Amino acid sequence: MRIAVASQNFRTVTPHAGKTRRFLVFEVDAGAPPREVERLDLPKEMAIHEFQGGGDHPLYTMRAVIAASAGPGFVNRMASRGVDAVATSETDPVAAVSRYISGTLPAAAPHDDDCGCH
């Protein structure tokens, strides 16, 4: 299964999943540690907050998207595509994926909707 982690700096889990354009993509196989298989560096119009297309989006192919924060609009949009959107306080991308798989991923603080978009 493929899991994307919001990471604007490609080093840590970063906030605001809907505006994020950079993601680390991990492949997770049973019994094996997660391995990074791709880095998404999307143009501005492909951030979910901006994406208006009804067609394909790279995040729609993931099993889950993990970020430091995610608003209800993002969570609902991902859920409508069968993608689990999760906000966490974990800052290490590999640990976040591992803990998601094991069911021990710590939740993030409630999302502060400072963009006025929801």
Image: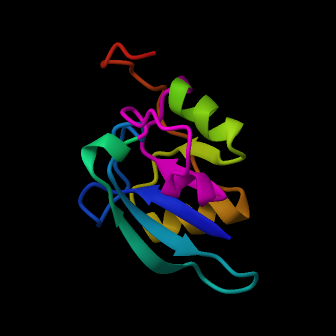
Q: Is residue 73 above or below residue 66?
A: above
Does 58 appear in magenta? Answer: yes
Give whichever of 116, 44 is nearer the camera.
44
> Where residue 39 sits in the image (x, y, percent)?
37, 70
Q: Residue at image x 67%, y 86%?
A: 32
Q: Residue at image x 69%, y 64%?
A: 101
> Where residue 66 sits in the image (x, y, percent)?
52, 51
Give whichever of 45, 82 is nearer the camera.
45
Q: Residue furthest right?
A: 30
Q: Is residue 111 above or below residue 80?
A: above
Q: Is residue 113 above or below residue 67?
A: above
> Where residue 54 sits in the image (x, y, percent)?
56, 38
Q: Residue furthest bottom?
A: 32
Residue extent of the magenta highlight: 48-72
* Total numbered circles: 0
> Where residue 89 sits in the image (x, y, percent)?
45, 46
Q: Main secondary structure of the magenta part?
A: loop
Q: Is residue 118 above or below residue 68?
A: above
Residue 22: name its quadrant.
bottom left
Q: Residue at image x 42%, y 41%?
A: 17
Does 83 appear in magenta? Answer: no
Residue 69: name its quadrant.
top left
Give whichever of 9, 62 is nearer the camera.
62
Quadrant of the frame with the N terminus: bottom right
Look at the image and name its color scheme.
Answer: rainbow
Q: Residue at image x 53%, y 25%?
A: 73
